[in-house]
Structure formats: structure tokens, C-alpha cells
Image (spheres, grey):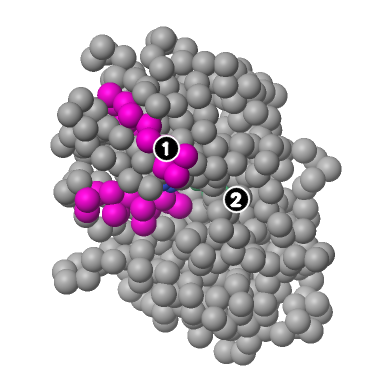
């Protein structure tokens, strides 16, 4: 099968490349995707018969049209302060311009009634400063899991007329041809002049192999490790009502490590996440009032960068996550009061607590899993946040672990996100350049525009 452009991966990066190419050119484009079409993506966990992850061969939460973002909270953060380092490649102004462009597309495909929140002019900034916390600047469009799905569906319905989508079609190899590239799959070979690789976090191991094969330099990246906090929504309502999502950073007194809040879900759910068979925790929420819960959740993460000789930062975090999987059969849940008293949580203690968990996880002891330095940082930050949101450090506050934010290794790409091979681009989270919906999507638009400019 011959195409002008083959896109590997139908996550936000791949989708927005496809969108841009479909809108602005007549190029023949194929998208190859390991997972299924959007409507066929179903996680078997139903909370009744199947309560926890059963390690499906292809995880429906991470793979398929929409990528890892399909069932996410759909928080599109428009900022250069976090979510990736796209601006280091394409410039701050361009990166913001493209994130706004992506926002317009989302809004015009079903997101028109959603809200954009902003930290501009908020009192909270000063209150944070007065309490040794830093609030990062951002605007965030919250689509919510339900509207995010509708937006994706509308975009797909439009794209499928112009683009050939091949679902359940994992690419096994990328080969270099005389005049382009070959994506090898069990369903046949797809030859193209230009290849955009956008395989996200779930494709990280595969991409590592591809880079080794093609001798594309890579570098190790950081990894963020921590726990997800769940507490009654009113405790955080004064923050979430105004900002929805706030990225707050705290520098610990003990080690001078930075601990930050991540992925805040007002009145949302805590969920399992399966990356390459390892179960960690994440969160999301719905825009629909009837699907909201009584709790708010967010992660507290500590970044780890390793220096020589150690390179495998993801491997380090995987080992910690595996430890929690070994002890808890998946995610571990613990009351903050139990953690502080040095004892495990039991189902009885959780049931007696005032916070009703939104994820069924195994009661246990996170101090047996998380390294002391990381756990100390999390505990310190919980007390720091308690000064701006009293009640955060309550005994019944729930902690789920572990939460890991894997960063793909950095792939050596230039300021066009192109590898040393002309016409072979690596974008989105798979490139290590981005790690969010808005940055990944913007990288997709950027590369498509570069391809069109060069034609
Ligand atoms: C539960 C959850 C909630 C999240 N919430 C948010 C949020 O609110 N805001 C935010 O900014 N970010 C959020 N994220 C992160 C966000 O989803 C990612 O940053 C984003 O999806 C990255 O886009 P991507 O296109 O680079 O990769 P992905 O979305 O990971 O897509 C990559 C696609 O490539 C496919 N693929 C992989 N390997 C191959 C192969 N060999 N052949 C063919 N296809 C392949 C995969 O199946 C996948 O569909 C969340 C993530 C999760 C898991």
C-alpha cells in the first residue's frame, strides 16, 4: 500500500497531523493504530464482575483512536510552563499559537459549551506565595471525559472521509527505503514518502527499538513519582471553582526537592492506568453534572533526574510501581492518618473513614513502596497545601499509589521535529518533547504544516 504520508499512532499528536493534512492538502494519508476505533474501545473493568485491571493484550484506555487522551479528563492546558518542552524546539510564541489553534478546533467540534479557566489575576497566586507554594501560570480548557469523547468522535467522522484509518494494526518495524519509509504490519507493508511517528507513552518501548534499529540517538529523560490524593470536594472548591486545575509547586524544606500537583479532577474519579502491564493510578472527571462525585483528586509528584551511570529513569519508576502491584495486586490505597501513624490501612479503617474512595484499590502501606525521600516530600507538601486548603492533611484523606508519570526517552529531533532522516518525524509524547494533550496536539499541527510548507 502506497501513501504520501503514513502516521503511526492515532493519539492527539497523530490526529492533529491528520486533521491538518486533510484540511490543507490532497495528500494521500494513512493512520496506523494498534488499538481500536473509538466506539470499540472498552475497558473491561465494570466495578462488579471485573474490579481491577486484567492486563488486556491491548489496553483500551491507552490505545485506539484518541490515544491515551480518549478517556482522559480532556484538560487542554495552554501554557509553556508545563506539559512539555515544545517551545524549546519551535519557539514560545509558535507553541502558544498552535495550542490556541487546537483549542479552536476542539471548540468547533463539540466543545463550544465548555469553560476555559485562567490563572491571570487570581488572588490564589499571592496566597500560595505567602505559604511557600508557587502557582504556575496557565489557561486550561476543561472538556471533561464526556465532551472529549464527543469532540474526538466529531473529528473522526470528518477525517474518515479523507484519511485511511487502519485500526488494530500495530506497526512492528519502520524501514528506510530509497525514496521514503516502510511501516511493516501483520496486515502488510505501508510505503510512504513521509512518516510521522506519534506513538505516545504506550509505544515507548517499541520506539526505543526503532531508534536503536535506525541508529537515531536518544537520551534518558526524567520520571515523576508520587501518589494521588483524594479528599472531599469542598476542601478544594475555592481553588477548583475558580481555576479548575491548579499547578502548584512546593520546594521541600528537608531535601529542597520540588513536589507539584498534577492532573486535578474536581468531583472526579480515581482510575487505574496500565502502561505496558504495570498498573498505576490516574484520575479524570466528567463535565456532566450527573456524573460528578463528592470528591476531588490530584496527584503529588516528585521529579527524579538521574546522572551517570544510570540511564533508565522509566525502569526505576516501573520497579517502584511493580512493588505496589506485587503488594497490592494493583494500586494501593492508604488513609493519610494511617500513613502518618506508620500503619497500613485496612478495609475496615477505610470504611470507617469519612472519604468514600472512588477507586476500589487494595488497602496497604505506601511507605513500603515509595522511597523515603519521595514519601517525605509528599507528606511535607500535604501539610503545605493544608495551609491554603485546610482539611487536606486530615486523617481520612486518601492516598493512592503509585502514580507515575513516565516520560519517554528524548528522541534526537531538530527544530522541525524531524530526525536525522529527511521526512521521518517523531512527535507527541513518544518524542519526549511533549507530555500533555495540548502540546502533543500542537506538535501534530506543527509537523503537518512543515510538511505542507516544504511541498
Ligand atoms: C487516564 C489519563 C488521563 C490523562 N489526562 C490528561 C489531561 O487531562 N490533560 C493532559 O494534558 N493530558 C492528559 N493525559 C496525558 C495525555 O493523554 C497524553 O499526553 C496525550 O494523549 C499524548 O498524545 P500522543 O498522541 O503523543 O500519544 P498517545 O495519546 O499515547 O497516542 C499514541 C497512540 O499510538 C498508538 N501506538 C503505539 N505504538 C504503536 C505502534 N507500534 N503502531 C501503531 N500504533 C501505535 C497507541 O495505541 C496510541 O493510541 C492523560 C493520560 C491518561 C492515561
Q: Secondary structure at mark 2?
A: loop
Task: Residue 281 in the image: state x and y as whole percent.
Answer: 57, 63
- The image quadrant of residue 112 is top right
Q: Is residue 280 above or below residue 77?
A: below
Q: Is residue 442 visible?
A: no
Q: Is residue 442 above or below residue 227?
A: above
Circle 1: is it few (<14), some (14-19), or many (20+) Cα within 10 Å? few
Task: Residue 208 in the image: state x and y as whole percent.
Answer: 29, 54
Is 196 included in the stretch rendered in magenta? Answer: yes
Residue indicated by mark 2: 61
Depth check: 221 or 391 in front? Answer: 221
Left or right: 405, with 393 as reference point: left
Q: In the image, which disc is placed on residue 115? A: none
How far apart are the two marked residues, 2 and 1, measured between alpha carbons?
26 Å
Which is in the foreground here, disc 2 or disc 1? 1
Depth check: 446 or 128 in front? Answer: 446
Task: Residue 326 in the image: state x and y as whole percent.
Answer: 54, 81
- The image quadrant of residue 150 is top right
| Highlighted magenta segment, given as a residue range | 185-213
Quadrant showing the C terminus: top left
Q: Which numbered disc, 2 or 1, marks the residue that appears first in the sequence? A: 2
Q: Residue at x 36, y 23 (%)?
A: 2
Task: Residue 407 in the image: state x and y as whole percent.
Answer: 37, 54
Q: Secondary structure at mark 1?
A: strand
Is 236 included in the stretch rendered in magenta? Answer: no
* CB at disc 2 and ligand 1 closer than 8 Å: yes
Q: Is residue 350 above or below residue 101?
A: below
Residue indicated by mark 1: 188
Amino acid at each position: 500500500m502506497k501513501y504520501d504520508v503514513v502516521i503511526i499512532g492515532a493519539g492527539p499528536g497523530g490526529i492533529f497531523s491528520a486533521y491538518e493534512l486533510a484540511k490543507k492538502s490532497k495528500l494521500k494519508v494513512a493512520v496506523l493504530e494498534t488499538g481500536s476505533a473509538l466506539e470499540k474501545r472498552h475497558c473491561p473493568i465494570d466495578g462488579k464482575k471485573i474490579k481491577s485491571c486484567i492486563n488486556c493484550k491491548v489496553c483500551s484506555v491507552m490505545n485506539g483512536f484518541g490515544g491515551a487522551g480518549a478517556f482522559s479528563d480532556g484538560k487542554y492546558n495552554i501554557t509553556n510552563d508545563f506539559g512539555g518542552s515544545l517551545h524549546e524546539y519551535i519557539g514560545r510564541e509558535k507553541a502558544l499559537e498552535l495550542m490556541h489553534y487546537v483549542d479552536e478546533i476542539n471548540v468547533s467540534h463539540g466543545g463550544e459549551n465548555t469553560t476555559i479557566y485562567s490563572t491571570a489575576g487570581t488572588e490564589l497566586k499571592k496566597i500560595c506565595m505567602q505559604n511557600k507554594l508557587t502557582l504556575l501560570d496557565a489557561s486550561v480548557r476543561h472538556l471533561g471525559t464526556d465532551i472529549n469523547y464527543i469532540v474526538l468522535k466529531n473529528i473522526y467522522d470528518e477525517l474518515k472521509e479523507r484519511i485511511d484509518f487502519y485500526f488494530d494494526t500495530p506497526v512492528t518495524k519502520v524501514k528506510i527505503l530509497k525514496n521514503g519509509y516502510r511501516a511493516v504490519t501483520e496486515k502488510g507493508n505501508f510505503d510512504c514518502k513521509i512518516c510521522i511517528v506519534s506513538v505516545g507513552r504506550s509505544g515507548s518501548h517499541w520506539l526505543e527499538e526503532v531508534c536503536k534499529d535506525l541508529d537515531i540517538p536518544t537520551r534518558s529523560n526524567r520520571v515523576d513519582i508520587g501518589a494521588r490524593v483524594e479528599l472531599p470536594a469542598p476542601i478544594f472548591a475555592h481553588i477548583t471553582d475558580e481555576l479548575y486545575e491548579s499547578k502548584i509547586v512546593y520546594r521541600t524544606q528537608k531535601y529542597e526537592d520540588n513536589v507539584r500537583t498534577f492532573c486535578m479532577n474536581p468531583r472526579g474519579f480515581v482510575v487505574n492506568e496500565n502502561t505496558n502491564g504495570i498498573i498505576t493510578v490516574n484520575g479524570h472527571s466528567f463535565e456532566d453534572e450527573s456524573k460528578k462525585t463528592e470528591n476531588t483528586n490530584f496527584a503529588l509528584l516528585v521529579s527524579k533526574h538521574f546522572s551517570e551511570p544510570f540511564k533508565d529513569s522509566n525502569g526505576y519508576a516501573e520497579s517502584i510501581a511493580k512493588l505496589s502491584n506485587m503488594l497490592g495486586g494493583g494500586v494501593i490505597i492508604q488513609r493519610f492518618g494511617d500513613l502518618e501513624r506508620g500503619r497500613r490501612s485496612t478495609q475496615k479503617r477505610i470504611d470507617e473513614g469519612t472519604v468514600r474512595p472512588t477507586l476500589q484499590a487494595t488497602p496497604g502501606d505506601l511507605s513500603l513502596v515509595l522511597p523515603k525521600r519521595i514519601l517525605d516530600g509528599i507528606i511535607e507538601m500535604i501539610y503545605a497545601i493544608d495551609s491554603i486548603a485546610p482539611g487536606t492533611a486530615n486523617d481520612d484523606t486518601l492516598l493512592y499509589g503509585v502514580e507515575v508519570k513516565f516520560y519517554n526517552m528524548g528522541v534526537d529531533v531538530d527544530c522541525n521535529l524531524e530526525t536525522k532522516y529527511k521526512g521521518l518525524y517523531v512527535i507527541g509524547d513518544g518524542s519526549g518533547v511533549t507530555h500533555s494533550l495540548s502540546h502533543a496536539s500542537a506538535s501534530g499541527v506543527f509537523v503537518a504544516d512543515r510538511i505542507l510548507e516544504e511541498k
